Image (cartoon, rainbow, N blue to C red):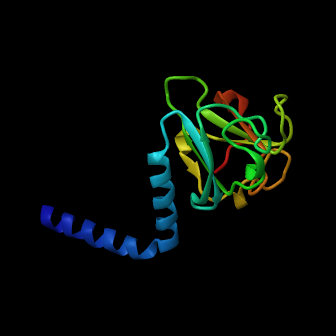
Amino acid sequence: MRKTTVALAAIGAAVLGTVVPAGTAQASAACDNAWNSTPAGSMAAYEHSNCGGALLGRTPGDDSNWGNSQGAFQGSDTNRASSVLNAGTTDTAWKEVQFFNGTGTGWTGGYSCLARSEFYADNLTDDYFTSGYVINDAISSHRWVPASYCGRFMT
C-alpha cells in the first residue's frame, strides 16, 4: 500500500508540474533568488517585473524621495519600479514596507504596503495605491511601518 501511495504521489507531482506555466516558475525563481541575496532587514526595487532589469536600490532605511540625490534611491529611480521585495526581519515591529506615489516626509499620496510575509511583489501592474493608481512605474518613496499603518497590501 505504501508503494502505491508513493507512486501515486509521484505521478500527481509530475502531472502538476506540466500544468504550472513555465513563466510563473521562472518569475518566482528570479524573485526568490533576489530575495535570498538581499541582506536581512532590507527592501529592494527592480526596474522590470520578476525582479529583473536594473536593481534600482536596496536599503534597510526609509527614502522619502526616490528622485533626489539622497538615500538609496536617486535621480531616475523614481517612478521606475515594476517589482519590489521585503526582506524585513521579525525582531522589530516595523516589518512592512509602505510605498507611496508622493514624496516628502509627510508621507502623502496614495500608498500600498508589502508585508514581510509576502517576500515580494513580482509584477506591480495588477497592484494599486489607495488613491486608485496602478503602482507599476509610480513609486516615489517608501518607509518601514508596522502592519497597523497599512490599509492596503500588495497581493
In the figure, 33 relative to 148: above or below?
below
In the figure, 4 relative to 132: above or below?
below
Residue drawn at x 64%, y 31% is 61
Residue drawn at x 86%, y 46% is 131
**Total count of labels:** 0
Quick check: 154 left or right of 67? left
Task: Identify the residue at the far front of this view.
Answer: 69
Quick check: 110 left or right of 59? right
Residue 94 visible in the picture: yes
Quick check: 79 left or right of 15? right
Residue 98 is situated, as x and y percent measured from the top left of the image, at 70, 37
Nearest the camera: 118 or 11?
118
Residue drawn at x 58%, y 23% is 93
Nearest the camera: 74 or 29?
74
In the figure, 66 relative to 27: above or below?
above
Residue 13 is situated, as x and y percent measured from the top left of the image, at 32, 68
